[in-house]
Amino acid sequence: MLEVERWAELRREHFVRGVGVRELAKRYGISRNTVRVALRATEPPAFRCPPRGSKLDPYKDEIHELLRRDPRLPAVRVRELIAPLGFGGGQTIVDDYLREIRPVFATRRTYQRTIYRPGEICQFDLWEPSHHVPVGYGQTRRAWVVVACLGYSRVGAGALVFSKEAPDVLWGIARCLWSFAALPGVLVWDREGSLHKGGGRPTDIYAALCGQLKLDWFFCERADPQTKGVVERLQEYLETNFEPGRRFANHLDFQAQLDSWFTKANARVHRTLRCRPVDRLTEEHAVMRALPGCQPDLDRRVVTRVAADPYFRFETNDYSLDPDLVGQRVDVRISQARITATALDTGQLACAHERSFARHRTITALEHACRLRTRRGEAEPEVEIRPLAAYDALIA
């Protein structure tokens, strides 16, 4: 069989330069019939191996019937079912054939391209970093990031939280919305347990936030991430571009690096939009509603009585309270940054601590320790110093 290059040379010499068949056969040392075949062929020569049958051919009808009943039937199970019929081939040819034929029997789903209007929606999701986040004192904790993405501009934002409880998730939502400097029309979530009551209805605390900010809500159906594909793609970008190769000193450093990354990501040219998200955000601001004067109150509130041991426990940590308020009731406010308490009767400040995300710590304010010492009348105990000879006498 002639090579492609020789075939092309023969046709060039004959049709372009007018060299005859006899001369070409003499020049290239081939028969004139070979030259004539090359000149008559309209396609380049190629080696074609005749198709061979597969060991799987006699059993394909049975495989089709199995897939017709259950398109998701595992390949290993398919081989087990056709083995008693006489199939003696390996698992590989079964896998290859099922990979090719399974889509024919599977339910086909089509997707409609969605175009969002400016300021229409904001999609949310929870992303869990692959590594625990340092929180100080040699400890790390499992964490999540509330990820938000505006549908029209694709501007994103994120907030680090350490639980999936409603107060933390709602705080993350508010932080993201305030980073956009405006309010969209609809918040889109999957059926997150702290936000979704069931049947497409929000929990009371989530409904209260939406009512306060005059926002609509929408919950995706189960196993339907395509409904919020915009934030899903942003989350994938976080996993592949933000997290790899980074180190974090603590949770504050994590949030600072995350904010810096979003600033950079929002200013890049978006592959789908062919423009920068921050530029389209200007268009959204023109139709989005302005933020209210202050952020909604999303702090946890606990009313407790100051015990004789004046400490308040939250998430395994003990925070000191003013010992002068023992026996009085105090209103404890727990935010993402601080834990404060005030006496209900007098309004006196009972404590103001920085919130610790490390575990099993006792956090005592200096003024509380001094007041405890004064109230208890503690003094340094006098320790008797005995001469060493007294111990020698006891040993002897």
Image: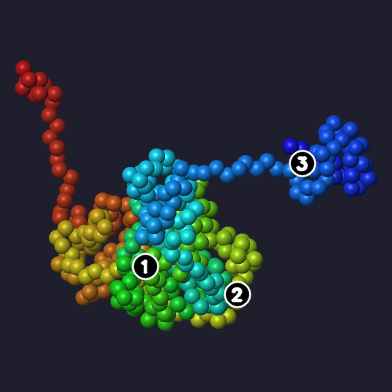
Residue 297 pos. (x, y %) = 35, 74
Q: Residue at x 39, y 68 (%)?
A: 190
Q: Few, some or many C-alpha atoms within 10 Å of disc 1 (few <14, some 14-19, many ≥20)?
A: few
Please, which colouring scheme is shown? rainbow
Residue 22 percent location from the top left of the image: 90, 37
Looking at the rendered structure, the secondary structure element under dot 3 is helix
- Residue at the image position 57 percent from the left and 64 percent from the top: 266
Residue 166 in view, yes or no: no
Foreground disc of the pair 1, 2:
1
Q: Which mark is residue 222?
A: 1
Marks 3 and 1, how far apart at CA? 56 Å
Is 313 drawn above or below residue 120 in the view shown?
A: above
Residue nearer the viewer, 390 or 296: 296
Which residue is disc 3 drawn over? 4
Residue 305 location in percent, x, y? 17, 67
Q: Residues within 10 Å of mark 3 (few under 14, many from 20)?
A: few
Residue 282's mark?
2
| Quadrant assignment, res 381 | top left
Distance, label 3 to label 2, CA atoms, is: 59 Å
Cβ–Cβ under 8 Å for marks 3 and 1: no
